Amino acid sequence: GQNIDQPTEMTATEGAIVQINCTYQTSGFNGLFWYQQHAGEAPTFLSYNVLDGLEEKGRFSSFLSRSKGYSYLLLKELQMKDSASYLCAVKDSNYQLIWGAGTKLIIKP
Amino acid sequence: IAGITQAPTSQILAAGRRMTLRCTQDMRHNAMYWYRQDLGLGLRLIHYSNTAGTTGKGEVPDGYSVSRANTDDFPLTLASAVPSQTSVYFCASSDGTGLGTQYFGPGTRLLVL
């Protein structure tokens, strides 16, 4: 079967750095996505990786290792508004997105 | 409008009733999707459409039907609602290329009693 694993919940301090991990086992791989979802709102696109390595976009970076079936999302200089759920999703061989259950990130002052 | 709209925002529905959730996008995206999101679970694909006139079944299609008469609209129908269909429903669209990013509507919160 297909599976995406992420930690259920993480806590970090305002101004700090946090890394959210995602491991996956899917039938085929056509890219990995990270989305942010604030409580009661829709998911919004953050980043996309299809090749191994690090993609940086402002305070957010995403890393991919296809051989290890592993990705992480790195958030720097955390702000209170970063409190949200972060969803990892993999596009499989049928080009359908398989979603993890999401990691709820709690930022404390 | 710009993006994806969904209606209604929320609904309380008696079991056994028929309900259509509406989704409209103005980005001229070829592909559209319906997901449900339940606490502790990832987004699960119900149905999808790669282009107007075609639809396909996702991971959890039972009890739901869709149609895609044109590019902009992708309604989801619950023929006879059951309590297990209580969920948050999100519509999404993408430009339909293999690696196209999906963009989501604001969601419909449905409670079936």
Image (cartoon, helix red, strand yellow):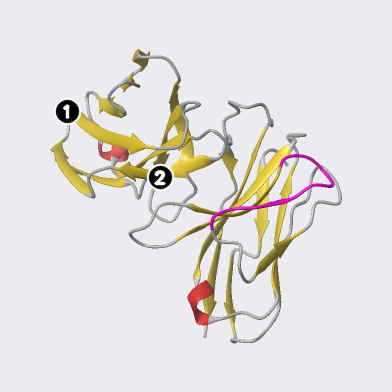
Q: Nearer the viewer, residue B23 or A101?
A: A101
Type of residue at label 1? Gly
Q: Nearer the viewer, mark 2 or mark 1?
A: 2
* B89 relative to B53 in the view: left or right: left
Q: Main secondary structure of the magenta part?
A: loop
Residue drawn at point x = 26 percent, y = 27 percent: A75
Q: Name the disc covering residue A2, or none.
A: 2
Quick one: label 2 or label 1, which is nearer the N terminus? 2
Tell whether position B52 is magenta.
yes
Q: Is residue B28 magenta?
A: no
In the foreground, B40 or A42: B40
Q: Is residue A94 above or below residue B64?
A: above
Classify 10 Å Cα crowding around label 2: few (below 14), some (14-19), many (20 and above). Answer: few
Q: Which residues are magenta?
A: B50-59
Which chain's residue wears label 1? Answer: A
| Image coords of residue B112 (percent x, y) | 54, 80
Provide residue B1's location: percent of width, then percent of height.
Answer: 73, 42
Q: Residue at x 58, y 26 (%)?
A: B99
> Can residue A108 be seen in this snapshot?
no
The residues bearing labels 2 and 1 have C-alpha atoms spaced at a distance of: 36 Å
User: Same chain for the residues at labels 2 and 1, yes or no?
Assistant: yes
Query: In the rendering, which numbered label is found on residue A107?
Result: none
